[in-house]
Image (tube, rainbow, N blue to C red):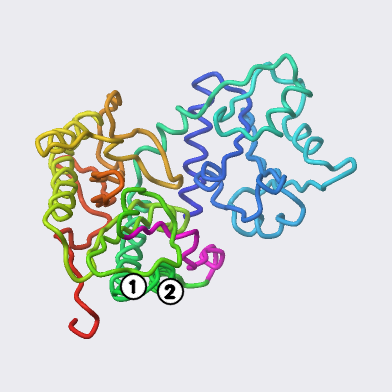
Amino acid sequence: MLDEARSRTATFQARLKDAGHRVAVITDESSIAYLAGFWGYLGIEFGRPTMLVLCEGAAPIIVTPLMETEMVSTMTWIEDVRSWEDAGPDHWTAILAKAIGEPAPREFAVETRLLPAIVRDFFTERYPDAKLRDVSPLLGEQRMIKSPLEIGVMRQAGAIAAAMMDGARNAMDAGVPEYEVALAVMNAGTRKAAGFLTGKGWEAFVSPMIHNLQIIQSGADTSMVHRRASVKPLDPGDPVYLCFCNMVQFKQYKLGFDRQFFIHHVSDEAAHVQETAVRAQQAALKSMRAGVTAESVAAAANAVYRDNGFSPGYRTGRSIGVAYLEAPELKEGDKTILRPGMTFAVDGGVTVEGKFGGRIGDSVVVTETGFDYLTNYPRELAVLQARAAR
């Protein structure tokens, strides 16, 4: 993984040079993980920025808090790791300025929409005449096509996702509170992830723990899409929707994965809504292959919604990788041409406000002739019988 990160950085530095960027300061955690191969756990939200500095003709530099230095130095392939302290002459602003060097650049390449406010203030105060140029499209275009190594990791994440869904399915029954289902998801996913890790070298820093608040809704709350697990017990006839989009991540690669189940029985109306969501997703996937536009994939799903009396409510999918949201997106107006190696979360979804919703989501990789699933789990209508009858 670190050899590939080194190669990515060399490619990105060449792209920076070709675009005329002399100094780039990268602050986004997913971008730093992609290029430098490491990540932190107490970052900018705690006022502790970590930055990757790329200067033309020079080796990369990492600027990170003193308390993170040992871990970062062990995780990354980059040799020049510079520590900063909370106060005094070694404050991060001073260390970053030294890393940038002299003469003062006239412009900086940054990810403008992801730049933390305190780092933006640093540029404004110390380099008031310098312009900030957005390098996000340059790096984003490089990240669109996943390598075989990346796809392999994402397939492992897909296997973890399936184990998580099995954990949920086995835990669900009438009377079981939503949070118990969420606990079963975390336990099953963590044990599956642990089986992929050696605990040696770089992998020693990869945690198998499945975390973040589980997105789960049941009953009429399935129309709310992104509500978190609560103490609400499941009732007979309830649809139960589980979204793992903020939980399925392995070695920093994030997937999208959604399924919906019904407790003991399902109404004809709810079944129609769920089956329409599945048909819409499958229509999108059947239209997906190298050479088509991102918006055409969304159009295929939207046609199914309209034919069944529903209005398209949101995008059909999003690109995935080391960030939860990458470019491009499967939505109207995105004319990006799909290429082999692009990876997407592809969704089907219908909402009947105040009553229920129907949802499904999978992660896939684009091929020359179509796609391959990264997540593979049954997609037919799933009605769960009482545990004693299973």
> Residue lying furthest top in this view?
129
- The label number, if any, that marks residue 187 in the structure image: 2
Above or below, 387 relative to 306: below
User: Residue at 52% of width from left, 64% of height from top?
Assistant: 206
- The label number, if any, that marks residue 204 in the structure image: none
Say which element carries label 1: helix
Residue 38: image location, x then y, percent: 57, 52
Q: Quadrant of residue 343?
A: top left
Residue 176: image location, x then y, percent: 36, 74
User: Residue at 76% of width from left, 48% of height from top?
Assistant: 83
User: Residue at 59% of width from left, 25% of height from top?
Assistant: 109
Mark 2 nearby-residue class (10 Å; few <14, some 14–19, many ≥20)? some
- Tell me, yes or no, whether the highlighted magenta stretch contains residue 44: no
Mark 1 sits on what residue? Answer: 167
Res 152 seen here: yes
Above or below, 261 relative to 308: below
Task: Identify the magenta region.
Answer: 200-218
Question: In this rendering, would 14 be left or right of 48?
Answer: left
- Viewer-nearest residue: 370 or 191: 191
Above or below, 175 relative to 228: below
Three-letter residue code for mark 2? Asn
Residue 366: image location, x then y, percent: 23, 43
- Tell me, yes or no, whether the highlighted magenta stretch contains residue 205: yes
Upstream in sequence: badge 2 or badge 1: 1
- Viewer-nearest residue: 139 or 77: 139
Three-letter residue code for mark 1? Gly
Between the C-alphas of marks 2 and 1, the distance is: 8 Å
- Are discs 2 and 1 less than 8 Å apart at CB? yes
Residue 154: image location, x then y, percent: 35, 55
User: Residue at 31% of width from left, 48% of height from top?
Assistant: 223
